[in-house]
Amino acid sequence: MATVRRLYGAAPPAAILDTLEDPRERERLTQRLGRVVEAPDRGFVDRQLALLRKANLGLVSISDDAYPGLLREISVPPALLYFAGTLSVLARPSICVVGSRRASRRGLINARALARELSETGVHVVSGLARGIDSAAHEGALGAAGSTSAVLGCGVDVIYPPEHASLAGAIVKEGCIVSEFPLGTPPLKHHFPQRNRILSGLALGVVVVEAGLESGAMGTVAWAVEQNREVFAVPGPIDHPGSAGPHRLIREGARLVEGIDDILAELPSLAAKRAEVPPARRHCGGANSGTADERALLAALDLNPKHIDELVRFCHISPAVMLPMLLDLEMRGAVVSCGGGAYALAASRRTM
């Protein structure tokens, strides 16, 4: 936090500001980083501004109009948000979907399906880019040709886990990635409980799909309760460890979720949005991929897992197109997700 205060309070070096041709951009950066404080770390500010410009990343302070309004209301809002992509998507009504990194097959399908339906209804989906439920939620939202955002426990220029680089790229095209941590910050363990308050703070409610009792997802719920957000939980088999967290939440008053209507019933403002969404927008993720791309993808797959990066290179299909196509094929039982961004043909698949 001390580093954030130094960055927020330090005067931007004139040499960096002079490289910005747009006077309005210079003024915005001056306002964001311009108040002089005692002994500012000018070298640190210098490096951050240079990195922002080089990587085409953004920076917004809590005093800016572009700062997410819901997040500004929490008890400890971040002074600064670094971002990649389109920050304005966070002004849309949002739901946070989180859960176990070691999710079951059923949990992953549930997370993708819920996120897809939320996105089709016009709801923005927020999650943490982690393995398991988080990545499934992002994929589900993208599969509906909707927007999704990821909150990181590291710098926005440090994608973690690294195998989600393609997913992160697709998210940036349709939404944004945000972090309160300065550029170059590694994914240290103690960063994630801190970032969880942002996950819940950006959303009207938090949906938990599989989680242990001491998991990060349950920590996000604790922040949600403190922030007066709605809490939802998807039940699971009683013999699965990931059911312990959701079942406890349900016993303590969280809304049991069997489908999207259970979420919309608690948030009338979201239910009203369903009628505003044109029917043509729904279920368009897979169809937009085209049959030629689908045939190329199926031809590239076999029963041995292949990483999405390899498939992108082989098929010459962008990750933004391939992710929803893979989700659609998975829902139809043609392919299976093998974890870690890898996919394979379903063993029972017949020639299509």
Image: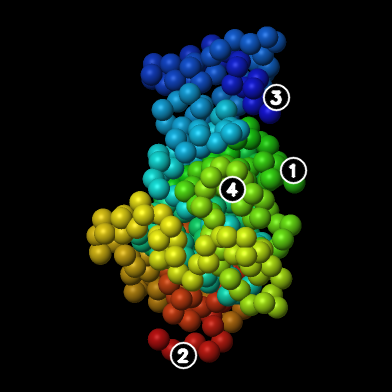
Give the residue pinned by disc 3.
Answer: 2
* Precedes in sequence: disc 1 or disc 4: 1
**Badge 1: few (under 14), some or many (20 or more) residues near its Cα, within 10 Å?**
few
Q: Residue at x 44, y 20 (%)?
A: 28
Which residue is drawn at the image coordinates 59% and 10% (left, top)?
36
Residue 116: x %, y % from top left: 43, 64
Looking at the image, is 291 positioned above or below residue 34?
below
Label number found at residue 256: none
> Which comes sooner in the sequence, label 1 or label 3?
3
Q: Is residue 143 left or right of residue 284?
A: right
**Quadrant the C terminus occupies:** bottom left
Residue marked by disc 4 = 225
Assign a secondary structure to mark 3. Answer: helix
User: Which residue has dot 1 on it?
Assistant: 190
Which kind of residue does numbered mark 3 sit on?
Answer: Ala
The local crowd at label 4, few if under 14, some if 14 to 19, many if 20 or more residues have their Cα within 10 Å, is some
Q: Which residue is mark 2?
A: 350
- Single out the mark in the foreground, 1 or 4: 4
